[in-house]
Structures are given as C-alpha cells and as structure tokens.
Image (cartoon, rainbow, N blue to C red):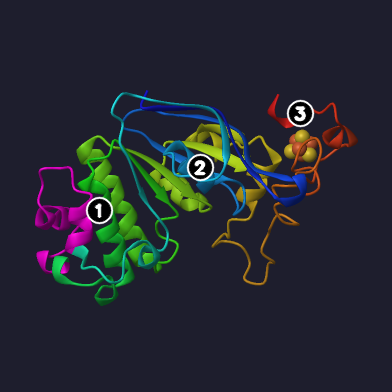
Amino acid sequence: MLLKVEHLRVAFKLGGGKVSVPVRDVSFDIPENSRIALVGESGCGKSLSALAIGGLVDRAEISGVVAKAPDTRIAYIFQNPMQSLNPAIKCGKQIEEGRRTAASVAELLASVGLDASAARKYPCQLSGGQQQRVMIAMALAQEPDLLVADEPTTALDVTTQKEVLDLIRQLAAERGMSVLFITHNLGLVAEYSDYVNVMYAGQIVESGPVGKVLVAPRHPYTKGLLAAVPSLSAPKDAPLAGIPGVVPQPDAWPSGCAFHPRCPVATPACSSASFTACPCMK
Ligand code: SF4
C-alpha cells in the first residue's frame, strides 16, 4: 500500500469559540500504481483532505493517521495553472527548482509534449493547456509516487481537457505512478479512475470500484450526483436534474446524517441524535 488514510479530521478554530470541521472522518487507501477518485460537490472536503495528506494545511487541528510507504513522494497539480505558476519566472526555471529526477528540463518538457523552447517562456506566453503541461512537468521533476490531480482540467476547454487527462494516464502508466483525481466530474471518474470515494460534508459516504459504484450506486447522494449528469439522449426541453439545496457550512453540519435536508428518501431517524449509518448502505 502506497498510502493509507484513517479517520482524517481537519478542523479550524473560528472566532467566538466556534470550530469549523471541513473534514470530519475520512478513510481511504491508495495502492501502488492505482487511479483513485475523490468525488463530490464543492465544499465537501475533497481538496482539503488531499492537502492534509501531503502536510500542506496550515493553522488547522489535524488528527487521524496518514501512513505512507517509506520515501513516498507526493506531487500536486491544481485546477488553474496560471494561479499556481509564478508569472514572473520563466517556465524552465520553475521546473528546475523542484527537480529531483536525472531527466533534464528539456526531457521533462518533451515527456509532456512541449518543445524545449517552452523553458524560455513566461507562463503568460503559453495557452492554458500548455501551462497545465508545464505544471505536470514540474510534478514529474519531483519523481512522485503519487500525483494528486485536483480538478486539473476545470479551466480548460473540452478537447484540451481530454489531452491533459490522457497525458496524465499515460505518464502514470509509464512511471508506475498512482494518481488521486479530485473532481466533481463523474465522466472523468468513469474514464480515468479504477476506484471511487464519494465525499459529502467532510465524510466518505460511499466507495468502491468505479464499475460497481457508478453502475449500482447505493447512497442517495451518489444517486443524486449520477442523476445530475446530463444525458445526450434526454429530450431537448427536459429540465436538468439536480440535487436540491447546497452543501451546508462546515461549522454547522446538520445533525444525524448531514445529507438529510437534501435527501429524497430521508426519514425522521436520519436526523436523530442516535443516527449511526445510512439504511441504504446496509
Ligand atoms: S441516512 Fe437518511 S438522509 Fe442520509 S442519505 Fe441515508 S436515507 Fe438519506
């Protein structure tokens, strides 16, 4: 096992004695050479969980266990490369800064499909897709065992999204690197992941092999996410399905099952103090 997360909790002290707990109880495994997805709406704690496993969260109370294989290296790529790259430093220098691999900057650029001349350019001289390739080259420069791809294609157009995702899959396969995809895009999960963890309100509510969870979801939240995926075969004027309401704030999770205010099959027992587990998961 490359990485094992058990009962991860991330809390922030707010003013007035209040505490915000965006990640409440998250457990998942990342085997070697695997593609794992963390999926859910914005505000469910996906990105924060991924940052916490790399020790990248400041000023938080973090508990739980993050067990890594010895010398495990984790690299991240984020959704908006222009915000992650330094606009005042040429791309080659930025790749060089974190380089641990013997591969040169030119070789790293070639491995992500960019010409060596990209090293002499500033990020603003590249397209969004090229910037994301530079981010991937920076990640590869660290020779990671695990690549965390946090909504890596959200800021890109559809054809570039596919190119970047195919590239990540190809590089992971060539290097035996595991990938943790963080996304709200179930299409991406279906095509690029082997195993999925569905997160809601700081907890994993359902997990399993992609073929099983996406074909026969059990948790009402997973079913809601799947029902919200637009279908090309639906009538043109059919209203888009969605999950009513919004993800609650992490300093005020609802009592019992946090999904009960939005759940179409909630019962009074779901919001009671004695709630333990969703009956749909039994
Ligand atoms: S516990 Fe109840 S409210 Fe929560 S998801 Fe299950 S059925 Fe819905």
**Is residue 135 rendered to the left or right of residue 193?**
left
Label whose residue precedes the other's in the sequence (1 or 3): 1
Query: Which residue in the rendered view is the most extreme toward the front?
Result: 16
Q: Is residue 217 above or below residue 129?
A: above
Q: State the residue position of label 1.
A: 138
Question: In the rendered structure, does residue 117 fall within the stretch colored magenta?
Answer: yes
Q: Residue at x 36, y 63 (%)?
A: 81
Question: What amino acid is at disc 2?
Answer: Leu
Find residue 277 and report its horizontal and vertical position in percent. Answer: 74, 27
Question: In the rendered structure, does residue 191 fall within the stretch colored magenta?
Answer: no
Q: Residue at x 18, y 43 (%)?
A: 100
Q: Nearer the viewer, residue 201 or 282?
A: 201
Tag 3 secondary structure: helix
Q: Nearer the viewer, residue 282 or 270?
A: 270
Tell me the number on the disc at residue 279.
Answer: 3
Query: Which residue in the rendered view is the most extreme toward the bottom?
Result: 125
Find residue 269 and report its horizontal and vertical position in percent. Answer: 87, 32
Q: Residue at x 17, y 54 (%)?
A: 96
Question: What amino acid is at disc 1?
Answer: Met
State yes or no: Cβ of the residue under disc 3 lies below 8 Å from any atom of ligand 1. yes
Of the four image quadrants, the one with ligand 1 is: top right
State yes or no: Cβ of the residue under disc 1 lies below 8 Å from any atom of ligand 1. no
Label whose residue precedes the other's in the sequence (3 or 2): 2
Q: Residue at x 71, y 24 (%)?
A: 282
Q: Nearer the viewer, residue 249 or 259?
A: 249
Q: Categorize mark 3 by other alpha carbons within 10 Å: few (<14), some (14-19), many (20+).
A: few
**Is residue 239 rendered to the left or right of residue 208?**
right
Tag 1 secondary structure: helix
Mark 2 or 1, which is nearer the eye? 1
Label whose residue precedes the other's in the sequence (2 or 1): 2
Q: Which residues are magenta?
A: 92-118
Marks 3 and 2, how far apart in space? 22 Å
